[in-house]
Image: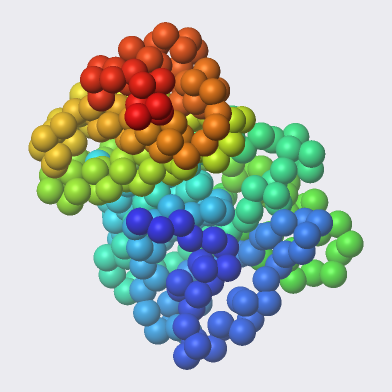
């Protein structure tokens, strides 16, 4: 699984043959405002002659999609079916795959970076909003009436982004805020559990999340995730389910895999740095040197100091 930037997003859905490519690559962004853009789904499908499939990846930008059509969304161990009308709030926290199920698609979506909706500009902290948390169910069914109400917001954004109003980006941020608050009042769609594909995906996501904690490159670098429960929460699944998946895939529990990777990093730091044992312990998430020493000895049958000296 790769992480897709806002620039790579454009390359992902538009190719050189699409007449809209040049238009969309002239990004609505600069260093002061961040990035914001809005798209008409029906127009994109018509001009670019194809359904817009979003592969299973993590993305660095936010996306709000107003959907009119039959679609599937996959994330964690869930598959969400949007039978007709829905709205999706995607964030960098949750990787997902989006798959249109027919050619008859319409609606709108907007993409924006965290800089565009920075707290200093909106009084909103995206990281603390329930709809963008890693525990959020971010796909919602909506009624025809709700669709029409939300569509009016997108239409205003679409009109505003083309205007020459000096404060148009402030106004666009207000429209995005309105979409976010509207979404936080909705009820999420119940997802169906997958089997083989979900198991493979969860294993891959766990390993990617684990490896992202390393390498430890300075004494001020501390592990963000240490326990099986913390990893499960980030993957939006129950820790027992994560253990079951990893046990089936690797023969080891989540805790055993985490411990093995921390031990591997501890060996590297003991051999390749001059950091003292206390500094290494702290970087690896141990509050006490004794706890680290006991952990290391349990994993390697030798103490950290003895391992370094030999």
Q: How is the image coloured?
A: rainbow
In this rendering, position of residue 47 left or right of residue 211: right
Res. 188 image quadrant: top left
Query: Which residue is nearer to you in this view: 108 or 241?
Result: 241
The spot of residue 48 in percent (x, y) is: 45, 83
Q: Quadrant of the N terminus?
A: bottom left
Location of residue 156 with respect to 272 vertically, above or below = below
The spot of residue 248 in percent (x, y) is: 10, 37
Q: Find the residue positioned furthest to the front.
A: 310
Q: Quadrant of the C terminus?
A: top left
Is residue 44 in view?
A: no
Location of residue 217 with respect to 243 vertically, above or below = below
Query: Which residue is nearer to you in this view: 1 or 179?
Result: 1
Taking the spot 16% from the left edge, 32% from the top edge, the residue there is 252
The spot of residue 179 in percent (x, y) is: 60, 45
Location of residue 66 with respect to 143 vertically, above or below = below
Instruction: Tally the marks.
Output: 0
Taking the spot 61% from the left edge, 64% from the top edge, the residue there is 38
Query: Which residue is nearer to you in this view: 41 or 52?
Result: 52
In this rendering, position of residue 150 left or right of residue 193: right
In this rendering, position of residue 69 left or right of residue 281: left
Is residue 116 in view?
A: yes
The spot of residue 207 in percent (x, y) is: 31, 43
Res. 31 image quadrant: bottom right
Taking the spot 74% from the left edge, 71% from the top edge, the residue there is 162
Q: Find the residue positioned furthest to the right.
A: 166
In this rendering, position of residue 159 left or right of residue 280: right
Taking the spot 78% from the left edge, 52% from the top edge, the residue there is 171
């Amino acid at each position: 699984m790769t992480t897709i930037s806002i620039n790579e997003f454009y390359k992902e859905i538009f190719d050189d043959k699409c007449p809209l490519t040049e238009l969309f690559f002239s990004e609505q962004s600069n260093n002061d405002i961040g990035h914001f853009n809005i798209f008409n789904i029906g127009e994109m499908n018509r001009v670019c002659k194809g359904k817009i499939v979003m592969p299973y990846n993590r993305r660095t930008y936010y996306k709000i999609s107003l959907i009119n059509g039959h679609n599937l969304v996959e994330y964690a161990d869930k598959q969400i079916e949007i039978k007709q009308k829905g709205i999706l709030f995607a964030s960098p926290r949750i990787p997902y795959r989006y798959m249109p199920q027919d050619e008859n698609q319409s609606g709108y979506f907007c993409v924006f970076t965290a800089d565009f909706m920075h707290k200093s500009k909106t009084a909103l902290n995206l990281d603390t909003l329930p709809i963008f948390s890693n525990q959020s169910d971010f796909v919602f069914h909506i009624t025809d009436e709700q669709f029409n109400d939300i569509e009016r917001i997108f239409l205003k954004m679409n009109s505003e982004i083309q205007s020459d109003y000096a404060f148009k980006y402030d106004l666009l941020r207000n429209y995005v805020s309105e979409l976010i608050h509207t979404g936080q009042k909705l009820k999420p769609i119940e997802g169906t559990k997958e089997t083989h594909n979900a198991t493979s995906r969860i294993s891959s996501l766990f390993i990617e999340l684990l490896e992202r904690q390393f390498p430890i490159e300075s004494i001020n670098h501390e592990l963000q995730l240490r326990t099986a429960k913390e990893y499960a929460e980030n993957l939006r699944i129950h820790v027992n389910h994560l253990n079951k998946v990893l046990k089936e895939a690797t023969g080891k529990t989540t805790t055993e895999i985490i411990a093995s990777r921390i031990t591997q990093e501890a060996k590297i730091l003991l051999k390749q740095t001059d950091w003292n044992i206390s500094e290494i312990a702290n970087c690896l998430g141990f509050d006490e040197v004794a706890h680290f020493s006991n952990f290391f000895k349990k994993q390697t049958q030798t103490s950290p100091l003895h391992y370094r000296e030999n």
